[in-house]
Amino acid sequence: MKIAVMGTGGVGGYYGGLLAQGGHDVTFVARSPHLDAIRRDGLQIRSVHGDFAVSPARATDTPGEIGRVDLVLFCVKTYHTDQAAQAVKPIIGPETTVVSLQNGIDAAERIGAIVGLERMLGGATWISSAVEAPGIIKQVSQFRRIVVGEFSGELGPRVEAITKAFQPTGVTIEAAQDILKVLWTKFVFIAAISGVGSLTRLPVGDYRAVPETRALLRNLMREVEAIAGARGVSLDTDVVEKSLDFIDSSAAQIKPSMQRDVETGRRSELESMIGIIGRKGRELGVPTPTADLVYAALLPGDLLTRL
C-alpha cells in the first residue's frame, strides 16, 4: 500500500515505522527538527518489542508532494486536526481511505467534514509511545492495539485491506462492526487517565490504588459513560470496571500523552480529552461536575501554552 502518515509523533511514527519495515510505501509528514533528523538519519524506533530503524525514510512537511495515496494514517494532535485535514486534501484520491488514530471522539467527524466522510474509517489505538528526541520514537507499553471499522457496520474491503497490512507487524489489529462503541469505550479510559494523570503529575502506578484518586477516575469515567448513553451509544454495563482493570494491569510507569505535554509545558489535548465532556454534557443535559472540575484546574496552564 502507498501510505501517508499525517503526524509522525509517538503513534504515527511507531505504526508507520512498522508498516514501512513490512515493505509498504510509507511517507512520514513531520516538522523540523524532527523532519530534519528523519531525513538525515532515518526514523529510529526504540520499543519494548524490539528496536529498528527505517533508513532511508521518506519524509516531508508538504503532504501535496506525496501524490495520491491508498491510506492516510491521521495521527496529529487534536488541536491541529482541521488544519491537517486541509493539508491532506491534495493526496486524497477516489480510492483513498483515511483512518484517524487520534484521541477523543470527534476526529472522524471533523476530518470527514473536510475530506469527505465517505473516505473515513473509524479507528482507535491503545499504545504508550512518544517522540524521545528528533527522529527517535520510544514505545514503552506491552499493549499496541488498533481497532478499525466502517461507520456503517460493514466489514468491507477497506477494513480487510488495513487489517491485512498490519497483521505481519505483530500489532493486535481488529475489525469492529460497532466502531462507535469502540471509540466511546476507549474514551472512557483515556479521558480519565489523561485528566487525573495531568492533575497528579505522577505515573499511573503511583495513584491508581489511592482510594480518593481512584474515586476521581471512576467518577470521570461514569460521566463519559452517561454521555455515550445519551447519544445512543450502548456501552457494556461493566465498561468502567473493565477500564479500571486495564489501568491496574498497565505498567506502573505509564503516562498518557496529554499528561506528558502538560508536564513539559507544551500545548495539550485538554479541549478534546476533557473540555468536550462538559460541552457534550451541556448539549445533552448530562451533569459533568468531575470533568468540569478537572478542566477548570488544568485550563489556566493550557491557556498559557497557546500564547
Image: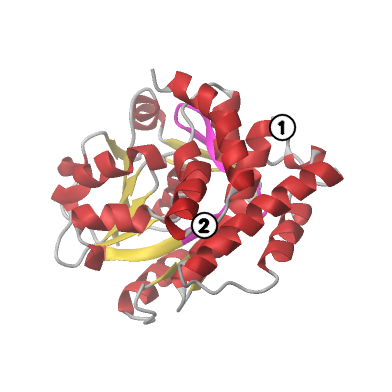
246 sits to left or right of 148: right
65 sits to left or right of 232: left
Q: Please state which of residues 171 and 275 is positioned toward the viewer in this rendering.
A: 275
The kind of residue on which mark 2 rests is Thr
Residue 255 visible in the shown view: no
User: What whole-number distance in Å separates the C-alpha atoms at marks 2 and 1?
Assistant: 24 Å
Number of the label disc, if any, that sits on residue 200:
1
- Camera-near label (2 vs 1) is 1
Query: Residue 126, located in which quarter of the rendered image?
Result: bottom right
Query: Residue 108, located in which quarter of the rendered image?
Result: bottom left
| Residue 55 against residue 188 in the figure, above or below | above
The kind of residue on which mark 1 rests is Thr
66 sits to left or right of 194: left
Residue 115, position as x, y percentages in the image = 20, 55
* Residue 115 on the magenta segment: no
Residue identifier under label 2: 125
Query: Which residues, given as a range, are shown in magenta?
Result: 124-145
Q: Earlier in the sequence, mark 2 or mark 1?
A: 2
Q: Secondary structure at mark 1?
A: helix
Number of the label disc, if any, that sits on residue 226:
none
Residue 18, position as x, y percentages in the image = 47, 53
Q: Secondary structure at mark 2?
A: strand
